[in-house]
Image (cartoon, rainbow, N blue to C red):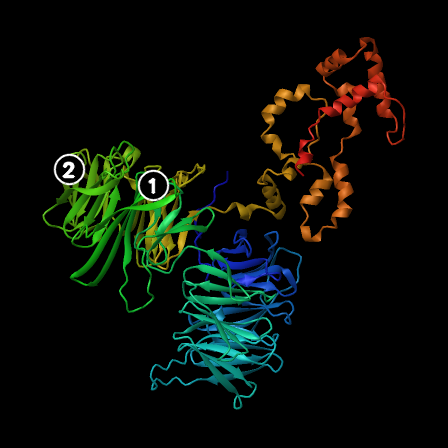
């Protein structure tokens, strides 16, 4: 195995709402950008049918190829435009532009050209340019022929639109509307008043859309108004009319395919359809759950699509009825709970939509379900102080879940509630077991379960700013009506009235470590006696964790002042310390490794080490330019086999981390998809075929039947030939479906390829024990020599001649061979 360098990649959970989604021409598929990838979803089943790999940086735009509706263009910050066959998920061609591309547009009239947004020298100045795509047979082609269309435009693709079948292009920025006419090669500019004299006057442009067949431009504004511009060929005779329903800024606009309707959306979570562009003719689709970021319309006109701020895509029928929801990792709220792993489902668990925990599958990159913690209706009001889900922890191998809710309007008015949820095998979900009002007098800073395998009684510890940590145990709460269990407080501990900031159990559950500002205390979990203390005068303890496996005798602590310390619990002394501004510290549950992410002025750095060795096993600088807030190790289902000492920390677990902008990232080597040719991808698909009748035709079931074949090989007279080397089947399977001839033409060739060849029927190739079996069944053993001769003569004759006569005994014996062939697969076709 050739090991490549580890690189940081955007993994599952990337933003699906980063750009407008795009429909296929037949509305069967919908495409959306997702980090470095483009995802292809089925509009009927909501399943991801393809992931288009290939870009090395964030994908910033996607558009259908106007000259071939089975192909898709994509652009990226890596400076390339890629052309895909989205039916087969194959990369066709890569055009290298060489500069960062921020958005992509295609027009049917502009043959062999696309339009992209590029950045000038200044960071906030962008240009719309035309890129000539040269024709070439090579896989990678340089596309350096650029021509400027519009200058000083907005970066967002929602602020650029092509109208009237590509006759002109409109762009908005701040208080300006610019219209460029391709035939005249002239630009008209229109300006709205930027005066703030009027109350709440906000004329800023936010988005623009153009009528597909008429000279009409719709613009959205910060004050919620929609303006329809006409006669914009003359800068003096232009007119506009206003539509107003939104009370906040208009986030996006889109015309229907025929142009008879205008769609708008914003922070009200309501899709508004303006029919005939009239104020009185409007329809609504309300309660969509989150702010509408983008609106798309299918080329067929039968479907709409809205992208939402909670990383959700909703597919909507023409009659304004929602038909499908594609839910990504919710990123609309601050992450207070951190990243956790559900021990049962191996799902990533964190804050979701308000008042919920979301369970997200990293393998399938989709949300499994939401757990409603607060069980209250959410009121979307920016001035209202909301109840926040601040803490959560799993315990007892996923059987228990603890959550903490908090609301504090004033410093003396704290509302605090802790809930404990029990997993129900019957409902396959968590059920509320115990609700504790005001478990502490101040905010809870940490909570942890004792997850030792030999733990007899479930135990939970909470630490608070009120200067106490509390131990909660599960007790019998049965009465005369039913058997039940509940949680109660068993012990309260403190240390000189200092604020308790962190807590954690040792791997075997025998010790509890609680940090009180700058001091770490060690407690016996059997008697709750204070055993020893470690004083760290370098600042308050920010992170605390025990070593695991062979390093279980060590305790690690990171302070706010940038000191990482390791204490030996056997000698009760400081083992080593290092100057490191640790923001994230996570132990690997499957090894002794600990990952620490430090923050510096230029970005975030990763350090992987064992507590027994102060020298790191692996260091990677600049994993992110922004602050990393959370991290977690996820156990692998199938371990990797890295042999390099620097990469072995990735063998058993994979490390994920979340940045301040809520980008979910991980560490990986070059993905297997990048190493495969299109033919290899199809062969890979064959290896993963489901067990269907067609699967058996391919002969792949032999892996499951190897033992049976070895045992019965001597008893079989004739065997079906393996079909993997037959040209007819290879031709059928390795050719894209849309370029194959009709099935009638292929049928005879395909069926003939499955027939047995005459050369396999000679008696010389038969096993000796088969001859003995035939000899026993024969009525006259003296005919056996004649039988062998007749078989050879029969094989040399023309079997195509029609011979009608009574079968001889030797011919009957010949037919017995075919009785042993297994034709059961035909019944399943």
Give above or below for 59 relative to 253: above
- Judged left or right of residue 55, residue 613 is left
Q: Which residue is mark 2?
A: 528
Q: Kindly identify the residue that appears in the image at 59 percent across and 74 percent down.
A: 212
What residue occupies the far front of the structure in this picture?
Answer: 481
- State the image coordinates of residue 725 (x, y, percent, origin top left): 69, 36
Q: Nearer the viewer, residue 747 or 152?
A: 747
Give above or below for 287 relative to 804: below
Q: Nearer the viewer, residue 80 or 288?
A: 288
Q: Kindly identify the residue that appears in the image at 13 percent across and 50 percent down.
A: 498
> In what quadrant of the picture does the C terminus appear?
top right
Location of residue 327 by image quarter? bottom left
Q: Kindly identify the residue that appears in the image at 58 percent across and 46 percent down.
A: 676
What residue occupies the far left of the structure in this picture?
Answer: 496
Q: Nearer the viewer, residue 644 or 437?
A: 437
Q: Which tag is nearer the camera, tag 1 or tag 2?
A: 1
What is the number of the mark on residue 398?
1
Element at badge 1? loop
């Amino acid at each position: 195995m050739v090991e490549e360098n580890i690189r940081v990649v955007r993994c599952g959970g990337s933003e699906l709402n980063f750009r407008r989604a795009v429909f296929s021409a037949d509305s069967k598929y919908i495409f959306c950008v997702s980090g470095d990838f483009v995802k292809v979803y089925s509009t009927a089943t909501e399943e991801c049918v393809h992931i288009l790999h290939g870009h090395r940086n964030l994908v910033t735009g996607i558009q259908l190829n106007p000259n071939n509706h089975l192909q898709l263009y994509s652009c990226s910050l890596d400076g390339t435009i890629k052309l895909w066959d989205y039916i087969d998920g194959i990369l066709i061609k890569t055009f290298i532009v060489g500069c960062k591309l921020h958005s992509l547009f295609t027009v049917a009239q502009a043959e062999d050209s696309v339009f992209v947004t590029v950045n000038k020298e200044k960071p906030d100045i962008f240009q719309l340019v035309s890129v000539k795509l040269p024709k070439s047979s090579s896989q990678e082609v340089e596309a350096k022929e650029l021509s400027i269309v519009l200058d000083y435009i907005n970066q967002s693709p929602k602020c650029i639109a092509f109208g009237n079948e590509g006759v002109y292009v409109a762009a908005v920025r701040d208080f300006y509307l610019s219209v460029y006419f391709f035939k005249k090669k002239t630009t008209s500019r229109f300006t709205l008043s930027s005066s703030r004299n009027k109350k709440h006057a906000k004329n800023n442009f936010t988005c623009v859309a153009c009528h597909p067949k008429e000279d009409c431009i719709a613009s959205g504004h910060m004050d919620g108004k929609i303006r329809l511009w006409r006669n914009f060929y003359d800068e003096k005779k232009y007119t506009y009319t206003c539509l107003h329903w939104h009370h906040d800024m208009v986030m996006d606009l889109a015309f229907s395919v025929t142009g008879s309707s205008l769609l708008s959306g914003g922070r009200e979570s309501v899709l508004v359809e303006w029919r005939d562009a009239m104020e009185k003719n409007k329809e609504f689709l309300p309660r969509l759950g989150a702010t509408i970021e983008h609106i798309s319309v299918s080329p067929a006109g039968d479907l709409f699509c809205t992208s939402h701020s909670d990383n959700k895509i909703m597919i909507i029928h023409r009659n304004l009825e929602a038909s499908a929801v594609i839910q990504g990792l919710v990123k609309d709220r601050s992450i207070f709970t951190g990243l956790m792993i559900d021990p049962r489902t191996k799902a990533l668990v964190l804050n979701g939509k308000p008042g919920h925990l979301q369970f997200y599958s990293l393998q399938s990159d989709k949300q499994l379900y939401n757990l409603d913690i607060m069980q209250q209706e959410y009121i979307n009001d920016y001035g209202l102080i909301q109840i926040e889900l601040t803490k959560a922890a799993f315990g007892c191998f996923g059987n228990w879940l603890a959550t903490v809710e908090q609301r504090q309007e004033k410093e003396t008015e704290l509302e605090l509630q802790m809930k404990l949820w029990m997993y129900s095998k019957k409902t396959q979900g968590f059920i509320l077991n115990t609700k504790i009002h005001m478990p502490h007098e101040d905010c809870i800073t940490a909570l942890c379960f004792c997850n030792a395998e030999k733990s007899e009684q479930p135990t939970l510890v909470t630490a608070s700013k009120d200067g106490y940590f509390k131990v909660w145990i599960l007790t019998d709460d049965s009465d005369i009506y039913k058997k039940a269990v509940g949680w109660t407080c068993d012990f309260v501990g403190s240390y000189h009235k200092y604020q308790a900031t962190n807590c954690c159990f040792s791997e075997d559950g025998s010790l509890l470590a609680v940090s009180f500002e700058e001091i770490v205390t060690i407690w016996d979990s059997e008697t709750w006696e204070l055993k020893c203390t470690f004083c760290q005068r370098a600042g308050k303890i920010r992170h605390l964790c025990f070593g695991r496996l062979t390093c279980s005798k060590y305790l690690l602590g990171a302070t706010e002042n940038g000191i990482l310390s390791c204490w030996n619990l056997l000698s009760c002394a400081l083992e080593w310390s290092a100057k490191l501004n640790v923001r994230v510290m996570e132990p690997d549950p499957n090894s002794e490794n600990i990952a620490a992410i430090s923050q510096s002025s230029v970005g975030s750095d990763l350090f992987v080490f064992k507590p027994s060795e102060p020298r790191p096993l692996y260091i990677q600088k600049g994993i992110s330019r922004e602050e990393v807030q959370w991290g977690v190790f996820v156990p692998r289902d199938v371990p990797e086999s890295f042999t390099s000492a620097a990469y072995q920390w990735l063998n058993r677990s994979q490390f994920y981390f979340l940045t301040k902008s809520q980008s979910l990232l991980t560490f990986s080597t070059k993905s297997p998809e990048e190493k495969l040719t299109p033919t290899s991808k199809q062969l890979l698909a064959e290896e993963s075929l489901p067990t269907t009748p067609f699967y058996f035709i391919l002969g792949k079931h032999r892996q499951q039947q190897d033992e049976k074949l070895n045992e019965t090989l001597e008893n079989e007279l004739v065997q079906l030939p393996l079909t993997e080397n037959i040209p007819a089947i290879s031709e059928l399977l390795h050719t894209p479906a849309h370029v194959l001839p009709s099935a009638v033409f292929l049928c005879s060739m395909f069926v003939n390829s499955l027939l047995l060849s005459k050369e396999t029927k000679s008696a010389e190739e038969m096993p000796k024990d088969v001859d003995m079996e035939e000899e026993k069944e024969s009525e006259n053993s003296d005919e056996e020599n004649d039988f062998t001769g007749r078989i050879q003569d029969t094989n040399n004759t023309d079997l195509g001649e029609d011979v009608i006569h009574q079968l001889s005994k030797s011919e009957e014996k010949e037919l017995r061979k075919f009785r042993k062939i297994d034709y059961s697969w035909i019944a399943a076709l």
